[in-house]
Image (spheres, rainbow, N blue to C red):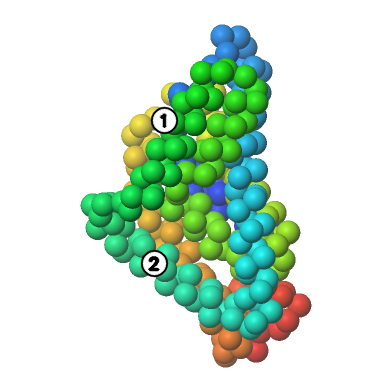
């Protein structure tokens, strides 16, 4: 899995972050000084968030390595693709389903800890709030992990999620440093297209999984998919 795809995927879906995590970013302490101080605060906060994504990428990468060695990576890619598409189709229904008790308690614990940190107004608390933000349940992050788990090694998986987080940085930086730069109307319009992005990702993972099963594919499709396979040196027949 090429690491640059992590930045691309993170950037394309970053407006989901603006919609979901934007209010959290706006609640962060804001220094009453110049743009440089604002930038420093934003970078410290987002560094914590990216670190959490990277850690999850590393953990999932170890599972992915075992799956790849066992020869089930192609099947897993297909299953993850189907799962993402199913999630997109049923997303509206799932919003009305009552969340499990452990889910609600976990989110409540994060919010409580976040509230304690936000009152401290220090660099370390900013970094801690970024880490907590990365722990919040997020379908967009799960989609990134679904791709990362199919990487070559745990370190590739960690690198992919780090690049994924960096890809979301411009939008998250903007919503904190210049809240009015991305209007509510623009956020709403872009968020309408995010399900199509997720659906396309699901289709890609399915095709990629089929390619890893050594099935016959057209030359054009094979050359497009091969760089994203777990072992790029292995030719797809």
| Location of residue 59 (image quadrant) | bottom right
| Location of residue 189 (image quadrant) | top left
Determine the secondary structure under disc 1.
helix
Residue picked out by circle 1: 23
Where in the figure is residue 54, as x and y percent of width and height? 65, 50
Residue at the spot x=45%, y=48% of the render? 137
Judged by depth in the image, the label closer to the viewer, 2 or 1, is 1
Q: Nearer the viewer, residue 7 or 80?
A: 80
Numbered circle sitting on residue 85: 2
Q: Nearer the viewer, residue 122 or 203?
A: 122
Where in the figure is residue 216, as x and y percent of width and height? 57, 90
Residue at the spot x=67%, y=65% of the render? 62
Label 2 close to label 1 by CB (< 8 Å): no
Where in the figure is residue 99, as x and y percent of width and height? 31, 51
For label 2, the crowd category at 10 Å Cα-Cα, with few meaning under 14, some 14 to 19 and many 20 or more, is many
Q: Is residue 27 left or right of residue 159?
A: left
Q: Nearer the viewer, residue 61 or 18?
A: 61
Residue at the spot x=55%, y=46% of the render? 11
Q: Nearer the viewer, residue 204 or 134?
A: 134
Determine the secondary structure under disc 2.
helix
* Mark 2 vs mark 1, CA separation in Å: 28 Å
**Residue 188 appears in the figure:** yes
For label 1, the crowd category at 10 Å Cα-Cα, with few meaning under 14, some 14 to 19 and many 20 or more, is few
Where in the figure is residue 235, as x and y percent of width and height? 71, 83
């Amino acid at each position: 899995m090429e690491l640059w795809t992590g930045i691309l995927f993170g950037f394309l879906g970053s407006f989901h972050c603006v919609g979901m995590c934007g209010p959290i970013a706006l609640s962060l302490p804001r220094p009453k000084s110049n743009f440089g101080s604002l930038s420093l605060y934003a970078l410290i906060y987002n560094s914590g968030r990216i670190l959490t994504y990277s850690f999850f990428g590393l953990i999932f990468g170890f599972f992915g390595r075992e799956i790849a060695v066992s020869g089930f990576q192609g099947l897993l890619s297909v299953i993850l693709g189907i799962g993402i598409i199913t999630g997109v189709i049923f997303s509206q229904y799932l919003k009305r389903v009552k969340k499990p008790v452990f889910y609600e308690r976990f989110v409540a614990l994060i919010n409580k800890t976040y509230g304690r940190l936000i009152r401290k107004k220090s660099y370390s608390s900013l970094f801690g709030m970024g880490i907590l933000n990365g722990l919040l349940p997020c379908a967009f992050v799960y989609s990134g992990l679904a791709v990362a788990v199919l990487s070559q090694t745990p370190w590739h998986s960690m690198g992919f999620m780090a690049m994924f987080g960096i890809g979301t940085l411009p939008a998250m930086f903007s919503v904190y440093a210049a809240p009015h730069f991305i209007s509510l109307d623009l956020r709403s319009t872009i968020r309408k297209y995010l399900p199509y992005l997720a659906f396309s990702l699901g289709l890609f993972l399915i095709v990629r999984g089929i390619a890893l099963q050594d099935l016959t594919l057209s030359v054009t499709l094979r050359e497009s998919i091969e760089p994203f396979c777990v072992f790029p040196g292995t030719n797809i027949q």
